[in-house]
Structure formats: structure tokens, C-alpha cells
Amino acid sequence: MHQRRKRQPLLAALASGVLAAGCLTLLPATAAPATAAPAPVGAGPTGSRQADFTAAAAEFHVPDSVLLALAYEESQWDAHPGQFNTGGGYGPMNLTDVTAAMARAGGAGAAGRGDLGTFTKDPALHTLDSAARLTGAPATALRTDARTNIRGGAALLASYEKTLTGGTPADPAQWYGAVARYSQASDRRTAGAFADRVYGTLRTGASRTVDRGRRVTLAGQPSLRPVTPQLVKAYPKAPATDGTAQRATECPATVSCRFVAAAPSNGQVANRPDDGMSVKYIVIHDTETSYDAAVKMFQAAGNNAAAHYVMKSSDGSVTQMVPTKDLAFHAGNYWYNMHSIGIEHEGFAAQGATWYTQAQYQETADLVTYLADKYGIPLDREHIIGHDNVPAPSDGTVADMHWDPGPYWDWNRFMALLGAPAPTAHGVGAVGTAVTITPSFENNVQTVRICPADDPTGATKACADRRAPSNFLYVHTAPDPSAPIVADPYTGAGGDGTTGIADWGGTVSAGQQYVVAGTSGGWTGIWYAGREGWIPNSGGENTTPAPGARILRPKSAGSTGLPVYGAAYPDASEYPSGLTPSAMNPLGKYAIPRGQGYVAAQPPAGTDDYFASSGTLVTGKRKFSTIQFGHREALVDMAGATSSPSE
């Protein structure tokens, strides 16, 4: 999901999450007599995390148990200093402060957009500012100091309670509405599910060692029943009209599917394809965390990230979180978000083979087949792509683009389940013709370097090499196994490519297509990201000729080559008055030199841009083709290119 080359694991994003809605149902609307919360067991000394909660609860007249349970659902009581800057949530209380820069580089991929500021206007994305006003504490302290952050969360919760009840009662049962409001959910159902989760923790209790190595404990109150009618006052809009209740899922009958709404700020309402915005791609991701934690994260306002679907590993069951007509911020590239559906898979890329189960493959295949039929998406690797194949929208975002689902997602197995198996006839055609990358997954054993930062499961204690069946081949600078691996100009820092699992810059994966640039012994040269690269291919065992594939070539590239892009927005002059044009500049370190060729994924299409605030789709006259450029796709203005079918 959020695997950057220098990764910030989603496992840590528990602190940004809100809930796994649908796991609990609303409790009866009558509250049982509440008893005072038992004194916490094992409270730490002054200055401990437990003492920080106790002090903040006393200062703002919040029941200590309610504050502890709320923070447990937000962060499991961890501070995670500095880890949530890209998600906007800070500290044990998940106080949000989302900036335009976060939307630019996050799942929204909004780099260059003229309406970037609208992504961050929702007050739910700025609870840290509210906490600062309530406490008088500086914003910096609320971000970085756990004790101050807890004070801010307590003050915010108390302010919601005063609005709802006129006071701050000692009875924990009376705080249900304020807890629901703290979720920042936009609808009653989602907020109620969050409050149910918090009160579930209040009843069962919890205990764990937090990031300072101190134990925090919440004693359970099994008989506690909250005053649930407060939810109506906190969210007066009826569930039947708030856009989440009784919503049907978009899943085939063979898939166990539920709908849980993502936070509205993690996507945009649209009407694809009736509004003219085509759906061209389905993007495969992995979560880097548990199924429930991923659902919780996407429900949290401020993450600027969500997928349309989340797939469970153990049984393949599905949570749909965004209607497919709408945009979900999943790809890190706004233009690709406009034209794609994102599917997250519970799992960890570094341990992928143990997480990507047959049930998950089969259920995803059924779902993808259903969606492809609905939207007319071809079942090939130019349209069914990994997150690692999505291009960056701008120069400044290339190095941070994600690499999931990783080397252990078996593309051959998955495409076969879609009814589009990899060709069995191997070989390589003449120079200038197209080939499909078709190694056998089981027999294609590759070595990758995995370090602790690549593996949020904690199973990798030190950097080590692993040899395992894989979906990719390394691309070398010469037809020799000792030749360096090709380095991407944005991530290689002028050196050679590496075998690091997160280094996507010198690899090709099963199903991708390239143009033959040469042959030498048991090696095949391909045009790759503006240069000639070489893959091992003895007897053509790793490729299959692809006659008929459309090959794009520059008409007359200048000294810097034919530019490539990460998005296809209209020209500034084509935007109507009142809409700020999105900036679209070439990816400056990439270009196609004269004489090279690249496989075009689909016929040229016009440029477009979407403005959710008015539901306006702006279209342009220029025609762009999507090509397989390096490991990632890229876009090319056809004014400077020609195309013809491969022989």
C-alpha cells in the first residue's frame, strides 16, 4: 500500500486509524447503571505514559478509562514520534494536521494540481489546531511531545462532551457521543462503529508495553453500557441519507463482500464513466499490515489514502470502501487515480509468498474479472498492474513511489485465474520486435536483499540475502551476469542498481512487454527507460514474441530525447475560467532517444482533469499513449511519436 523505496510501514499507521467498522454492532439504546472505573493496575511513576493519561484526564475532567480506551483505538498508546508526517496524524491521540505537501506526495498523488489546497480544507484534518487553541500549547509540542499530545486529545474530547451534554460527567457511559465525534467520521454509522470499538475496549480492558518501554493498563468494566442515543445528537443526519447505510457492494456473487465507507477526505466523489472519466486500470497493492488495520486506516480522516477494496489473506473476504464510480486515493498519482480501481491485499511484500494465499488470489481474480467486464478493461499486464508500475506524477515524487505488491506476487498464477495465462511458447524475435516477459515463477529463483526497514513484520532482524521463486528478472547494463544492474536515475544516486527488494529501478516483471534491442549469447537486450538493458534469456526461456503489440517510436527526438510524463492533463489554455490548470511537466531525467522503441499499452487518448468541487471534467485535444517505459509505465505525447504493430 504505502511501500516507498525508503518505506514508512503501514503497520505503524495504527496510530492514524479509526476503526474496523462493521466488526461491532450498536449496543442497546439503554444504559446500564455505570460504576466508577477501577483504578488502573500497574500505573507507572510520574512521567510515565500511564501517568500522562491520568493527569490529562484529571485536568480536563474526562474519565481516565474513557481517555485510555480512546487512545488505545487511535494508537495503542504509542507516540510514534515523527512517523506520521505523511499521514497527518500525530501522537497517542492521533491529532491531525494535514498539509498540502502531504496531499501532494501521499496516496492522492496531487503534485502539480492547481486545486491542491482543497484536499486539506476539511476541519477533520486539523484537530491539532483545535487542540492547540483549547490547551494553549504550541503546535510543535502537540506534534512531538506525547504528554502534551495527550492533554490536547483530552481537551478536544471534553469540548465535544460539553457541546453534547453541557458538562463533563464522571460516568464513562455518558461519553459515547463525544467519543463518536472524536472519530472525525462524516456519518453516523461510521462514528458509531468507532465508539462501539472504544467501548468494547472499555469493557474488556487492555494492557501493553508502549514505546518508552513502560506498561500501560486499562482495567476492564464488563458491565459498562454506554448511552448510545447520544449518537443521534452528535450526528443528527439520519443514516439512511448519509451515504453509508444500506449501501450495496460491487462484487461478484462468488465473493464474500461488505461495504465500509472510507473517510471522504481519502477520495473524491465522481460518476465514472458516465461523467466522461474512463476507468482503464486495476491496480494491485498490498497493505503492509493486517486486514483490520488497513480498513481502520482508510476510515481515518487525514490519511489522504484509501483503496476501493481490501482483500483478506486467510479467506479472501472483501471490504469495499469506495464506490468504483468514485476516485480513491490509492496510487500516489492523481491522474492514475482518476482512471483506476485500487485493490489492497492483506500481506507484507517482503514475506509475500506466505501471505498471498490461494483464497486471496481466487477471490481477487473473481473481483477483477467482474470489474474488467463492467468497465471494459482488457485482462493483460498493461491494464492489470501493480502499484510498482504506476508512474510518478512529477520529478519530486519518483523516488518515493511504492514497490508493492513486490517480487513474490505470482503474476503468472493470477493472470491464469483471470483466463489470460502467460504464453507457453517461449522465444525471442528479431531486433525491433516486441516480447513479453514470461519466466516461470517456480523456476525463476532470484536473490534479493531484505533489511529490517523493508519488513514491518519484525521477522527480518538484519540485512540478509534471500533466494526464492520470484516474478522478476534483473536488467543488467551489459550481457554479462557480472555487469551492474541498471540504476534508475532518480533512485540510483549516480551509482549502480542494487538487489535491494525495494529497488525497482532495474527489474522487469512477468507480463510486461518490451522491444528487443539486441541479442548476445544467452542474453536479450531491451529498450528500458531510455537506455539499452540486458536480461538473461538462454534459449528464449524468459520471453515470448508478441506479434501485433503496438510499438511507439520517436519521430525526431532532439538532443534530450522525446519527453515522457507521469500524467496527461490538458494544456493550461484548455481550462475554463475559474479552474486553476494542473501543472504537467516532463519527468526530466527520463526521455526516449531516437531509434528506441517502447510497447504502447493502449490506443492514444485525450488529456483530462477532474475538479471534484464542481464535478467538472476538463478535456484537452492532445493525444497521449501509455507505454511500458522501464519497470513503470509512462505517458508520451503522440505529436512527437509514431506507432506501428510489432511483426
Image: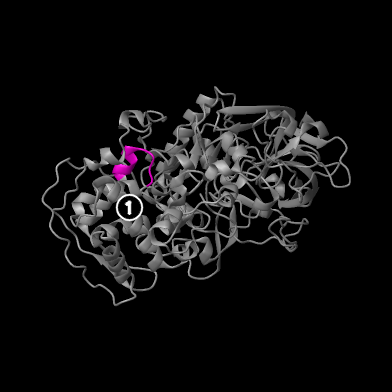
Q: Is residue 392 visible?
A: yes
Residue beneath disc 1: 159
Residue at 18 percent across and 55 percent down: it is 171
Q: Secondary structure at mark 1?
A: helix
Locate residue 533 relative to residue 56 in the image: left or right. right
Choose between 110 and 425: the one closer to the eye. 110
Quarter of the image for the C terminus: give it.
Answer: top right
The reply to whether residue 92 is visible in this rendering is no
For residue 585, above or below residue 17: above
The location of residue 393, given as percent across then percent down, is 66, 44
Which colouring convention does the figure follow? Answer: one colour
Seen from the viewer's position, the closer of residues 492 and 544 is 492
Q: Residue 239 vs residue 270: left or right?
A: left
Number of callouts in the render?
1
For residue 250: magenta? no
Please name whichever residue, 412 or 638, is drawn nearer the observer in this view of the structure: 638
The magenta region covers: 184-193
Within the magenta stretch, is there residue 192? yes
Q: Is residue 28 above or below residue 82?
A: above
Left or right: residue 64 versus residue 121 is: left
* Front-most of residues 572 and 295: 572
Give x and y (percent) for residue 33: 10, 51
31 displayed left or right of 14? left
Identity of the residue drawn at 52% across and 52% down: 2
x, y (%) of residue 258?
35, 36
Q: Amino acid at mark 1?
A: Ser
How packed mark 1 is, by other alpha carbons closer than 10 Å (few <14, some 14-19, many 20 or more), is many
Relative to 92, residue 511 above or below:
above
- Residue at 28 percent across and 50 percent down: it is 162
